Image: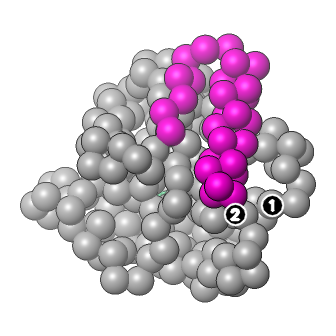
């Protein structure tokens, strides 16, 4: 089973991922961007305010392709539960904003690029926080962490949510860290129970 964590910057999902890792040491924990040379390419692009947004989409996508072959597919083939901090929905939500001047219907375009070869998540915990809080919490340290940008990213997450409500578990991430963590641990436990039924 593949569970992904998604949300705008500052939604607190990386903290949740770290806590889940302690709660469920038997699972495989991974993330995008990855810590490979593909991921380093992504980080370089993210640090460059003038990076070409289409090139950046394909760097993220290359990193995802390698993540699938190196980590995700082998772990799933072994029957592992995999929890990934960000995954394909991050591209659908973020790059659909960053490439919107270049491509018509960018969200559909990026989904179409992934669709033939990706492995969709079985479930996605969506950490829902308003863009102002997200930008303030994240400290606006990269080019994506601005409230106006995050607001568009959030609209894309909502579109993804509406298209597949059964895949998503919405977690109100504006609450205290303890409450958010409790909800996330409960959500994972419920997903495991549903799978075992
Ligand atoms: P990271 O340092 O991992 O931030 P966070 O802890 O908030 O996840 O950097 C991830 C950044 O990259 C974040 O701003 C979202 C962005 N991103 C994309 O734009 N597209 C993607 O496909 C992925 C995986 C991340």
Label number found at residue 27? 1
Specify the quadrant of the image occupied by residue 82: bottom right
Question: Tag 1, which secondary structure?
Answer: loop
Where are the magenta residues, as a range? 169-197
Give how far across and how far down residue 178 sits, in percent. 75, 19
Residue 192 lies in the magenta stretch? yes
- In space, the residues marked 1 and 2 are separated at their CA atoms by 6 Å
Q: Quadrant of the C terminus?
A: bottom right
Residue under the image location 69 percent in, 48 percent down: 193
User: Is disc 1's CB within 8 Å of ligand 1?
Assistant: no
Residue 37 visible in image:
no
Give the camera-side residue of 112 and 51. Answer: 112
Question: Tag 2, which secondary structure?
Answer: strand
Specify the quadrant of the image occupied by residue 132: top left
Give how far across and how far down residue 128 sits, in percent. 48, 29
* Residue at the far front in the pictured view: 197
Residue 168 visible in image:
yes
Residue 158 lies in the magenta stretch? no
82 left or right of 160?
right
Rendered view: 184 above or below 179: below
Q: Give the mark nearer the N terminus: 1 vs 2.
A: 1
Q: Quadrant of the N terminus?
A: bottom right
Q: Are marks 1 and 2 in contact (CB under 8 Å)?
A: yes
């Amino acid at each position: 089973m593949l569970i992904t964590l998604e949300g705008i910057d500052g939604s607190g999902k990386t903290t949740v991922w770290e806590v889940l890792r302690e709660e469920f040491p038997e699972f495989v924990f991974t993330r995008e961007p990855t810590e490979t040379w593909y991921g380093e390419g992504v980080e370089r692009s993210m640090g460059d305010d003038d990076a070409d947004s289409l090139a950046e989409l394909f760097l993220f996508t290359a990193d995802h392709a390698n993540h699938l072959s190196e980590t995700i597919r082998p772990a799933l083939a072994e029957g592992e539960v995999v929890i990934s901090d960000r995954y394909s929905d991050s591209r659908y939500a973020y790059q659909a904003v960053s490439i919107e001047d270049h491509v018509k219907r960018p969200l559909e375009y990026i989904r179409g690029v992934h669709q033939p070869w990706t492995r969709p998540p079985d479930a996605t915990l969506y950490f829902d926080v308003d863009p102002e809080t997200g930008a303030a919490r994240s400290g606006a340290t990269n080019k994506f962490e601005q409230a106006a940008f995050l607001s568009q990213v959030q609209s894309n997450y909502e579109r993804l949510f509406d298209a597949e409500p059964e895949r998503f578990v919405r977690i109100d991430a504006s609450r205290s860290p303890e409450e958010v963590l409790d909800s996330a641990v409960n959500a994972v436990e419920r997903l495991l129970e549903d799978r075992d039924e």
